[in-house]
Structures are given as structure tokens and as C-alpha cells.
Image (tube, grey):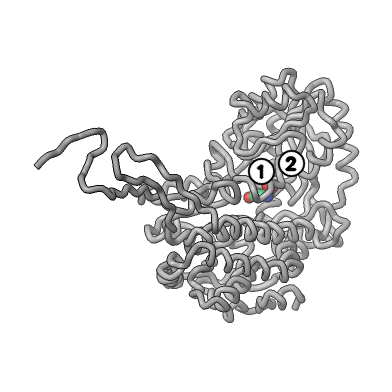
Amino acid sequence: MKEFLRELTIQADNPGVSTGQNQWAGHGKVLESYSPVDGHCIANTQVASREDYDAVIRQAQVAFEVWRLKPAPLRGDIVRQMGQQFRQHKQALGQLVSYEMGKSLQEGLGEVQEIIDICDFAVGLSRQLYGLTMQSERPDHRMYEQWHPLGVVGIISAFNFPVAVWSWNAMIAWVCGDVCVWKPSEKTPLTGIACQNIIREVLRNNEVPEGVSCLVLGGREPGEWIASDARVALVSATGSTRMGKAVAEATGRRLGRCLLELGGNNAIIITPEADLAVAVPAIVFGAVGTAGQRCTSTRRLIVHEKIYEDLKQRLQKAYTQLRIGDPMEATHHVGPLIDQQAVDDYQAALETIKAQGGTFVIEPGTLTGSGYESGCYVRPCVAEVENHWDIVQRETFAPILYLIKYATLEEAIALQNGVPQGLSSAIFTLNMREAERFLSAAGSDCGIANVNIGTSGAEIGGAFGGEKETGGGRESGSDAWKTYMRRQTNTINFGHSLPLAQGITFEL
Ligand code: UN1
């Protein structure tokens, strides 16, 4: 068995139902987990049945009764201890992320670093859950607001950031006094189990019920249970727009809250005044990092006609240097796609690009032979297209970059905004007017807009999320915590009479 699995106390050996030792193993069907790195079966996990799910929610509700009464700074202290544990297990968990999901070890370690960082952020936040005080219009009255815990927060996360996105939600929710029920992607259950093992120990050491952190394994079904369950106060879901619409409908029907972080179709505008030496690595990392499977991946490059040919050549040169292979080996830039289905989707997209009239300036392909046995390794490619084409309007979760030409900045911004999604965007320019126009109310319509850095790789300190079909939710830093709490406005009369607001008189 691999050492990092042992360290994370995952009883994962092929074959056999091997997560039975974990408290959170369910009684539903058995899920086989394959690594896209080498195609091996890592473990079999048993997903949650409806009864398992109900038991978990009940446990979460009981834990909430205790957790919500703990002063927020003490909750913060427990989150601080979690951060310490993640520091200790950074290497092993980073390796598991890389092995189970297929992203480079650097990026796997980066995800664990995000957990550590959001823990630190949440610890500070635990003393800063501020409400405002307002001036009352009535004499001898005081008016203020406070923020109370919401309850059970359901977290539905995606395979591409199997642990970081969970932690943005969970750590913030915990200092806010909520309890969490996490359904990781069915493609990455083991990282979920590993995190649960780490958290469980911290909770136990602090004599806090484990129900503060609950895990539900499975695919679409438990996701639907969470979304339609009135016991779940907030559903934070990351994934496809299709999934997000289903979650929004189900939570909307019961007037529950949801926080959606869905697809992106992120563009970089390259103006004639860009520093191309900085732009090229940003473009390539944005397009091929995580094999193009980030919601923030760069999918479209909107390039001024004057520098179009020059940039195309620079990209061709840069792409020939890309090394594709085992992501756990530091020399490789690009790992595999998550599974065979993703490879099929990549290939189908290539066909559609050709059919719609696109030309490849960097050729695609699927890799076979030694080192590529899993069948999930593909070549990052670049195609010249038009923005309005169907395929360009869609998010294909693969390393396919579209090249689009523009003449004026207004046109470039219109192209950038001319897609249904609105997550991340960037401009490369050293011209202050261009940059400020891009960031103005008439500029990018995305939740994230960058200057001289790429579309992906956001820091945890900012609020993360996007507009339009990206779902409108904000997670992680800034004041995203407010979504995880309920606001209560309090008015207190410390006088001897009852003056009414708006000057209304009411005498008996
Ligand atoms: C995602 O792909 O769901 O900004 C999140 C980034 C990462 C998060 C991506 N920090 O690229």
C-alpha cells in the first residue's frame, strides 16, 4: 500500500470494500476508485444509502446544538488546530490529491496549502464576525445587528479541487458556528475520507461531537437529497451549470439558501501594449494547468490583430516545451484528465471545433503507450475560432484554448463578456487606460477581473465566484462569511414609554 494512504489512515487496498473501518462508510452501492495517473484501482468505497444520509443529518443537527453555543473564538481555536494537522499531513494529502485526481504534485500541495491558509483566515475571522450598530430614530432605543449561525451547511464539491474548495466552505462555516455535511465528488472520495480522518481527530481531542463535520459519499443521489432537504440551511455547490440549476431549483422550491460556484469560460485579452514575456507563461499555465480542468482555466484568448501572429508563434514554441505525463513527477507540466468520460468529451469537442470551422494551430491528440496506460492523457491544443460558435460558448473541461482576434478594446471586452458564464477574466496591458476601462462598470462582467496575471490561481483572501451562469455565489475570503450566517436586527427600548417608528401614535 502506498505510504501516503497509510499516513492518512485510509484502508485502501484493491480489491475489497476497504473503507468499512471508517465511520462514514455507507451501506449503499460500492464505488470503485481508479487513479487517472496509472489506471489502478485505489480503493472501493461504499456510498451512503438514504438511511445513512438521514442518520448523518440527525447527527449534524445534534452537533449543531452544541457547536453554535461555543464562542466563535473558541471555534476558531479548533480550526487553528485543524490547520496544524493539515500542515503536518501536507505532503501525504498533496500526494493523494495528485494520485486520485491527476493534477501535478505541485498543485496537489498547493491545494493543501489553501486549506492551511483558509484555516488561518478563519481563525482571525472568528474574532471579527462584526455586525453594524444603527442610530435609532426613537429616544432611549438602541438598534444593532448580530450574526448568528445558520445550521447545517451542505457542501457539494467537484473532483477538480477535491479538498481546497471544501475547506473554503467548511472552515468559514465552522467559525460561523455551522456544522457541515460534505459530499465530495464520487470521482474523488478518498481525499474526502482523508480530510474527515484528520478533522475527526481534532474534534475528538476537543471533545466536540464529530457531527460538526460529516461526510456523505456518493454521486448525484445524495446531492439531490441535500439540495431538497429543509434541514440543510445552506447548500454550497461547485460543479457544472446543469448541476447548479438543479440545486437552485431544489433549494428554491423550499426557499432554502444556495451558494453556487459553477462553470467558467474565462478569457484573457492581450492588447498591443501587453508585456508578452509575462503574458505567455500566464496563458499557458491558465490553459494547461490541471489539464484545463479548473473552473478558472483560460479557455479563450482574445488577441489584438497587430500582435496576433507574434503571439501565435510564441504559443507554438511554448507548447512544444510542455511535458505530459505522471503528475507526481516534478518534471511534468500536464497530467491526465480525470477519467475516460473526460477524454471522450475532449475528443467530441475537437470534432465539433473542426465541424464548426475551427483550425488547430497546435494539434490535439490522445496519448498511448508506456506511461499513458490509464488512457487519460491528452495533448493540450490551441484552435482558431469565432466567439459566437456553440462550442466556444460552452465550457469543455479540457486543455483546449481558443484564439480569437480583435481590433478595438470595446470589441475585445464585448467578446470577453459575450458568453453565458462570468467567472474569471484578465487583461494584459501596460496601458493604464486600457486596464482601467477593463475594470470599470463598462468592462469585464466577471466575478474576477485581473490585470497582468492570468485567470486561474486565485488567492483565498478574496471572495471567489462569478456572475451569470457561474451562479453568483462567493466563497472563501473577504466578507463571503456572511452567506454562512443569518443576520438578526435587534431593537431595544430602555425607556419608560413606547414611541413607535415613523412617528405613528397609538394611544389606548
Ligand atoms: C475551481 O476550479 O473550482 O483560482 C476552483 C483558482 C483556484 C480555484 C479554482 N484557486 O484557480
Q: With respect to residue 107, does 88 lie above or below?
A: below
Q: Secondary structure at mark 1?
A: loop
Residue with the most extreme left position: 508
> Cα distance, mark 2 to mark 1?
8 Å
**Left of 116 or right of it: where is 480?**
left
Q: What amino acid type should be assigned to the residue bearing mark 1?
A: Thr
Residue at 50% across / 74% down in the picture?
A: 208
Residue 162 appears anywhere in the view: no
Q: Residue furthest bottom?
A: 21
> Mark 2: which secondary structure?
strand
Q: Residue 35 in the image: x percent, y percent?
A: 72, 65
Expressed as whole percent of the image width and height from the top left, the position of residue 18 reads 62, 78
Q: Residue tagged by mark 2?
A: 400
Q: Quadrant of the N terminus?
A: bottom right
What residue type is disc 2 on? Ile
Residue 56, percent from left and from top: 45, 70
Q: Which residue is mark 1?
A: 396
- Residue ranking furthest to the top: 408
Q: Is residue 263 left or right of residue 495?
A: right
Identify which residue is drawn at 34% across, 49% down.
Answer: 490
The spot of residue 80 in percent (x, y) is: 62, 66
Closer to the camera, 108 or 479? Answer: 479
